Amino acid sequence: MLEKEDARNIKKYIVLAYMIFWLLLGLTGYMIFLKVPSYIQDIMKNVCAWSPTFAVLIMLKKLYPNITFKEYIKINFMKKINPMMFLISFLLQLLILVIVIIAFFLINNKPLNTLTFISISNIIPVFIITITGGALGEELGWRGYTLNLLQKKYTPMMAGLIVGIIWGLWHLPL
């Protein structure tokens, strides 16, 4: 059952996450208006995605008075991740990528030795933007805090639907 304090905290958390998001999104829009370089815009888009995590960090001592952020991560995520499944998932994605590349060359009747590679200096920024964007910044707040707390009162399906609506509305401006 969701206690009154938890209900108040979850409302405060959602409002704070939205406020941070809109502030950062407005700043990003202003930067786009000023025509700052596109890599700065990409960085700011990633920073916007981290607003749910920023809200958790700001409220962490109120939400979890007796634990550190590192413990919060362990409690909400590390016990739920099977390293072997993570590795299998990663390798499966890599295999699919290789198959797609080979299929592209076969379909277009091009020899594999015509494959050109991007320089590492071009890959690193894209890799950093990709790995730090999107879900990584959102999960700590929406799934780590909000979903887990709502599952105290609702079934996993209902809690997921509630978080899905909140999360979906949060994505609406994008």
Image (spheres, helix red, strand yellow):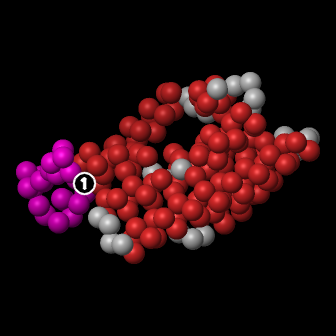
Could you tell me if residue 151 is visible in this image?
Answer: no
Q: Which residues are magenta?
A: 102-122
- Of 162 and 13, nearer the camera is 13
121 sits to left or right of 153: left
Please give the count of numbered marks on the rendered protein: 1
**Secondary structure found at label 1:** helix
Could you tell me if residue 75 is visible in this image?
Answer: yes
Location of residue 38 in the rendering, given as x and y in whole percent from the top left corner: 31, 64
Location of residue 116 in the rendering, given as x and y in whole percent from the top left corner: 12, 53
Residue 85 within the magenta-colored segment of the rendering: no
* Residue at 36 percent of width and 72 percent of height: 34
* Residue at 41 percent of width and 39 percent of height: 90
119 sits to left or right of 101: left
* Residue at 17 percent of width and 51 percent of height: 118
Location of residue 142 in the rendering, given as x and y in whole percent from the top left corner: 66, 49
Q: Quadrant of residue 108?
A: bottom left
- Residue of label 1: 101
